[in-house]
Amino acid sequence: MKRIVTIQDISCVGKCSLTVALPVISAMGVETAILPTAVLSTHTQFSGFTVKDLQDQIEPISAHWKKEAFHFDAIYTGYLASAEQIRLVADFFDDFRSDDTLLFVDPAMADNGRLYAGFPDDFPKAMAELCGKADIIVPNLTEACFMTGMEYKTEYDAAYIREVLQKLAALGTKKAVVLTGCTADPGMTGVSGLKVETGEFFGFSHEKLSASYHGTGDIFSSATVGGLMRGKTLEESLKIAARFTVASIRETIEHDPEKTYGVDFEAVIPELIADLNA
Ligand code: PXL
C-alpha cells in the first residue's frame, strides 16, 4: 500500500484541509499520515475562530520520522498559515524527498480575486517558492495570478490561460502545473494544465453548478493525490477528482442546500471508489 503524508491544518468544523484529505485519501486505499500545522475551531471563513499554531512541532516530528526512516510516496501540502511554516515545509521536502516521492502542492490561499483572511501581501511570494520545489501544483486562477503577477480576470480566453500556465511553469515546478476551476469554454468549469517536461497543454471542461461551497478545492486535490497514488495518470486522476467534486456539490445542493460550509462528500465516496476501480 502506498503511503503519503499530508501537511495542513485541522479545522475542527467546516470540512476542509485535513478533515477532507484524511477520509478521502484513506478511502481510496492509500495510507494517509498527517502533519497538522495548526488546530482551528473552524476554518477561517467563520468569524471568531480560534487558532493554536503547531508550527513548533514540525521539526521534532520530522526528526523522529527521520530516525524511524519513514518513506513517503507523496508529500501533499495544502493551506499553510505563514511564510515561516512554508520554510519549514520546504525543509521537510528536502528531508523526505526521494526519487519516487511525488511533491504535490495545493497553494490554498486565495479565491475570487482575493487572499484568504489573515494572509499578508508577501505570502504568495513564499508560496510561489514552495511551488517551485514541487512536482505538481494545483492553484486556482486567483492563486496563480498572485504567484505570477498576471492580471486576475473573470473572463478570459485560451491564450490567457496558456500564458498563466507558462508563467506558473517558470516558477520551477518539475512535472505539471494545473489550473483548477479554469477553462476557456464559456459557461463551463474545468481544468487547464501544462506538462512541464514536454511542453504539452492539456485540459477538460465539465458542468458548472450554480452553488459554490468552501473546501471543494481540498476535495479536488485529495482525490487527485489518491488517484495518482493508485496508479492513474495525471489526467485520469484530475477527471476522477472533478467528478467527485461535482457529485459532492450536487449532493449538497439536493439534500443540504442551506449549508454554509463544506460539502457532503461522505455521501458520494462509494461513487468515487467505483470510478477509481472502473
Ligand atoms: O480550504 C482551504 C482552507 C484550509 N484551511 C483553513 C482555511 C481554508 C480556507 O479558507 O481557512 C483554515
Image (spheres, rainbow, N blue to C red):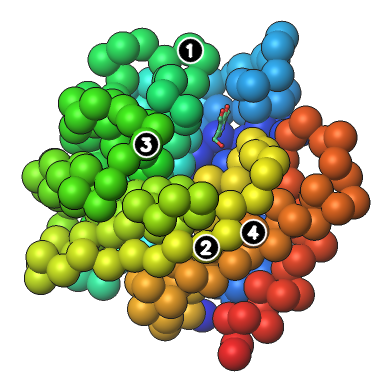
Q: Amino acid at mark 3?
A: Glu
Q: Mark 1 or 3 closer to N-term?
A: 1
* Residue situated furthest right in the rendering: 255
| Residue for badge 2 | 206
Instruction: Name the kind of residue labelled 2 in the image.
Output: His
Distance in Å between CA atoms under marks 4 and 1 = 29 Å
Asked whether residue 67 appears in the rendered view, the answer is: no
Measured in 3D between alpha carbons, the distance from the residue under mark 4 to the one under mark 3, in whole angstroms, is: 22 Å
Of the pair 211 and 66, the residue shown nearer to us: 211
Q: Quadrant of ligand 1?
A: top right
Residue type beneath disc 4: Val
Q: Mark 3 and mark 1 in contact (Cβ < 8 Å)?
A: no
Disc 4 or 1, which lies upstream in sequence?
1
- The three-letter amino acid code for the residue at tag 1 is Gly
For label 3, being within 8 Å of ligand 1 is answered: no
Element on which disc 4 rests: helix
Of badges 2 and 4, nearer the viewer stands 2
Q: Is residue 121 above or below residue 115?
A: above
**First in residue order: circle 1 vs circle 2:** 1
Residue named by callout 1: 118
Which residue is disc 3 drawn over?
155
> Quadrant of the image for the C terminus?
bottom right
- 10 Å crowding of disc 4: few (<14), some (14-19), many (20+): some
The reply to whether dot 2 and dot 4 touch (C-beta < 8 Å) is yes
